[in-house]
Amino acid sequence: MKAARIVKPKEPLQIEDLPVPRPRGKQVLVRVLASGVCHSDLHLWEGGYAGPRDMFMRVEDRGVRFPLTPGHEVAGIVEEVGDEVVNTGKGEKVLVYPWIGDGACPACTVGEENLCDRPRSLGIFQDGGYAEYILVPSERYLIKIDGQEPEQVASLACSGLTAYTALKNSSIRAQEFLVIVGAGGLGLIGVQIARAIAGSTIAVIDLDDKRLEEARRLGADHIINSSRSDPVKEVKDLTNGLGADAVIDFVNSSKTVAKDLDMLRKRGRLVLVGLFGGSTELNLALMPLRAYRIIGSYTGKYADLVELVALARRGMIRSVIGKRFRLEEVNDALTQLKEGKIMGRAVLNP
Ligand SMILES: [Zn+2]
Ligand SMILES: [Zn+2]
């Protein structure tokens, strides 16, 4: 089978011809129909993240090994199952839950495998979906998607689930004022999910008018271009000088977070999601005086992905598909994503 692999960070991905894996025991082999191209794939490709004071946090120090087939937003069709698989059969359309853990740590035992102490996520710590086939360790990581478009549901496994979990972590309620920072793939799906589950007022901040218009079309009540106006002042003006009840930052850079804290109301929640990286200075006395909460949010659990797929089935959220690429065009896809040329999601169709 063909697989697009990172052999070495920063070098072009290579299309390799690998043997098709044979599923054994509980394993399921899925033929990939759609594989989302995610920003975190760029971090894998670059070999790490920006840390504080220009430090670089290498993915290899977090347990990533190359060569690696990336791809953690995978929808496809079951090709073959191991002899211990009971409820899944050849030909079924499925979405793959990629945030696999060891099944044994405290997080895994409460169903939060995405926060496992020894993560084994597909497309990060083991081979993922930039390939014609993907081997999934167990059918309990599959969600049936009969009647739903593989391209539409693929990105729910990462950007959709991440946005959904961030919304839950923000504890946002109807009547409250929510700010979403960043109208990329995550932010645009975040707006729709906020519309579907929260009923709050939504303001979206970005630097790009096109993205902001898309956010408005998908349900944002207010859009703010932070290259032209001060987002803190805009949010204060919209909230009678009080500030936002919650800010979800899908960028999460030194620049955005400094503003986030200034636009929060007392008792406000700041949910940090993006992996842009950097560092920030905290006004420590203000933390207790204004009773802020800062919450880190990373992907989401299997049970929430099941809920999200159900929301999508009812038409309440739709992924914005930006561009489609063949597997051979993978380097082009990643480069365009890096340069910000893709609005919505880039999808590989192996
Ligand atoms: Zn992702
Ligand atoms: Zn675990």
Image (cartoon, grey):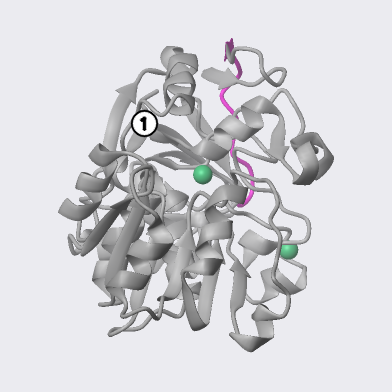
Nearer to me, 278 or 151: 278
Please tell me which residue lies in front, 329 or 350: 329
Residue ID for mark 1: 347
Residue at far right of view: 61
- The residue drawn where x is 60% and y is 12% is 12
17 within the magenta span: yes
Give percent across and percent down for residue 234.
Answer: 33, 63
Q: Position of residue 81 (x, y in %)?
A: 51, 44
Ligand 1 near label 1 (Cβ, under 8 Å)? no
Q: In the rendered structure, which segment of residues is drawn in magenta?
A: 15-26
Q: Residue at x 71, y 35 (%)?
A: 48
Q: Judge left or right: residue 340 versus residue 343.
A: right
Q: Is residue 340 above or below residue 287?
A: above
Res 299 visible: no
Towards the viewer: 218 or 269: 269
Percent x, y of residue 251: 51, 49
User: As displayed, is residue 26 above or below residue 65?
Assistant: below
Q: Disc 1 residue type?
A: Val
**Is residue 21 shown in magenta?**
yes
In the drawing, does residue 183 fall left or right of residue 7? Answer: left
Q: Main secondary structure of the magenta part?
A: loop
Image quadrant where residue 20 sits: top right
- Label 1: which secondary element: strand
Image-based side of 73 in relation to 192, left or right = right
Counting from the top left corner in percent of width and height, residue 346 is at: 36, 31
- 321 or 279, nearer to the observer: 279
Q: Quadrant of the C terminus?
A: top left
Q: Is residue 18 at all visible to an observer of this figure?
A: yes
